[in-house]
Image (tube, rainbow, N blue to C red):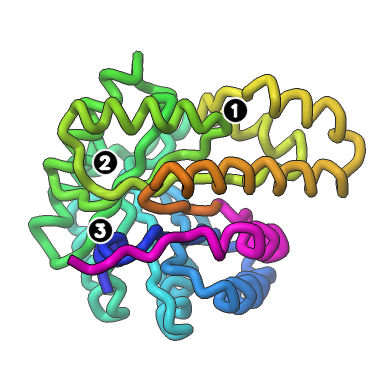
Amino acid sequence: MKTTEIFKYKQVFSYEVFPPKKSSNVSTIYKTIEELKKLAPDSISVTYGALGAKNNEETFKIASAIKSYGIESITHLPCIGLTKEDVLEKLEELKKLRIENILALRGDLPEGDYKKGDFTYASDLIRFIKENGNFNIIAACYPEGHIDCKNIVEDVKNLKIKVDAGASQLMTQLFLDNNVFYNFKEKCELADINVPIEAGIMPVVNKKQIEKMTSLCGVKLPKKFIKIMERYEHNPVAMRDAGIAYAIDQIVDLIAQGVDGIHLYTMNNSYIARKVHEAVANLLLEKKAS
């Protein structure tokens, strides 16, 4: 099933997982998925590292396993370093696995020299997938602007190119201030971007985690969140619970404001996902089919 269809009937709630870096730990991801299955997610996405990361070969296997559990799966596909022949091979494999949903990305640019491949931007990959298969194509978006883009206006223009190229659904990078998301939504509407947008939420459970995310993605920290970190950073359990509570507050507000969906970055932690689900499951709205 193409996940974009689900938005017609309800506010969507989905999760993201990633293949463990060590092959010896692969079994742990299946235990996580079994726990997530109990939460009845609308879909689960599986990340895929750029430029031949060692755990990439597990991405499609995990996505296929998710399908076997009766859950719609989304596989990430970054284009940096890939040729058109590479992508065609991957599309053929996904067809055989009956995986219909692809999150098409550029991928993080590595330092130094690297194989360029045939695709410069995510929009190039989206257009190529659209021309070579009947997939539901999802694109990433950045409420605070992509770190490589000079401003949010330019970034929204680039997002419009992705949608026009064939993206029928969007997922945001994590953000910690809902007003940033609402302002971004307004800019999307002005740019005539009219596809469902899932808000990406990551419960931040330790200081190191958010410091890494801010350096990689440029996510801004609200004063309220900084105070939480300062108060609880030396108490791991309290920081975990405070991070979950902060994410729940974000999600409750987003649901009340009619967000299309929530995409929870689980960091492969089913405990966090379960706590969030317990708090918000009854708030998600069913929509009447027209």
Identity of the amino acid at label 1?
Thr
Calculate the distance from the C-alpha at mark 2 to the C-alpha at mark 3.
15 Å
- The residue pinned by badge 3 equals 86
- The residue pinned by badge 1 equals 214
Task: Tell me which segment is drawn in magenta.
Answer: 265-290
Tell me the SS state at disc 2.
helix
Calculate the distance from the C-alpha at mark 1 to the C-alpha at mark 3.
32 Å
Quarter occupied by the C terminus = bottom left
| Residue 167 seen in this snapshot | yes
Q: Where is residue 235? Give x, y as percent.
A: 91, 40
Identity of the amino acid at label 2?
Ala
Q: Is residue 279 magenta?
A: yes
- The residue pinned by badge 2 equals 122
Earlier-in-chain disc, 2 versus 3: 3
Identity of the amino acid at label 3?
Asp
Calculate the distance from the C-alpha at mark 2 to the C-alpha at mark 1.
22 Å
Tag in front: 2 or 3: 2
The tag on residue 264 is none
Taking the image as shown, residue 56 lies to the left or right of residue 275, namely left
Q: Is residue 60 magenta?
A: no
